[in-house]
Amino acid sequence: MKRNYWPFLFIGIFTFTLGMIIWTIYSSTQVPVNQDESFLNSYQKVDENFNEIALANEKFLNNYDFVLKVNEQEFGLTYSDIFYSQRVIESRSPHKDILNVGDNQVQIIIKNKNTQAVVNDAQIALRVTRATNNKSDINLEAFEQNQDLYQGSFKLDMKGNWNITGVVSVGENKGYFFLKTNAI
């Protein structure tokens, strides 16, 4: 009598497939999940309310002059980097190479557009985060107010791609910014 080995092949394929399914589920549960928090909000809320964010920036800039200085480089109230990949930023953005490994300084100047008076009651929340995970998040909320600007500092411990995101509130007006950069 001749033996038929085809059933062993199907049992082997089934066992291998079942093992790979179990391994995939186990491996995926071991990987940490990092939620993107652009503009200090979940990506679902940003996606749902992006038009309101754009209109809020426009309204904020109609009432106030805003300058964000990171290590003496000046930026406005911008969020256009959110649309670009890190490769685009590295190749042609003015936002590249603005952070240093070690000490970094942030200064924010907010002036009333009509009176040119410095705004003294702004609420500023700023986060410096790695583009890949949330382990290295640096939150800056306690800015020192010194004459006509708000000052803060932070320290980076590694090179790589970083995002600077934040919200500035003056009364009912809110402004949002998002910069992609890297530390050298």
Image (cartoon, grey):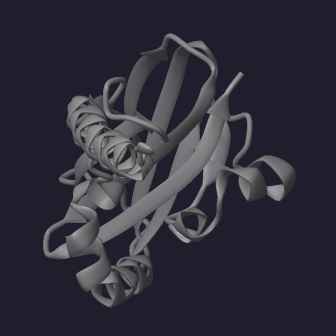
Q: Is residue 45 left or right of residue 79?
A: left
The quadrant the N terminus occupies is: top left
Q: Residue at 40% across / 83% down in the picture?
A: 54
The quadrant the C terminus occupies is: top right
Instruction: Give the x, y percent position of residue 76.
Output: 56, 62
Q: Residue at 56% across / 14% down in the picture?
A: 158
Placement of 116 over or under 7, stated as above or below = below
Instruction: Give the x, y percent position of residue 112.
Output: 37, 69
Instruction: Give the x, y percent position of residue 155.
Output: 45, 14
Residue 149 at least partly seen: yes
Quarter holding residue 70: top right
Q: Residue at 39% across / 47% down in the picture?
A: 13
The front one of 103 and 13 is 13
Q: Residue at 43% across / 75% down in the picture?
A: 113
Quarter holding residue 61: bottom left
The front one of 119 and 166 is 166
Instruction: Give the x, y percent position of residue 137.
Output: 33, 30
Q: Is residue 1 left or right of residue 168?
A: right
Residue 119 at least partly seen: no
The front one of 156 and 118 is 156
The front one of 105 and 16 is 16
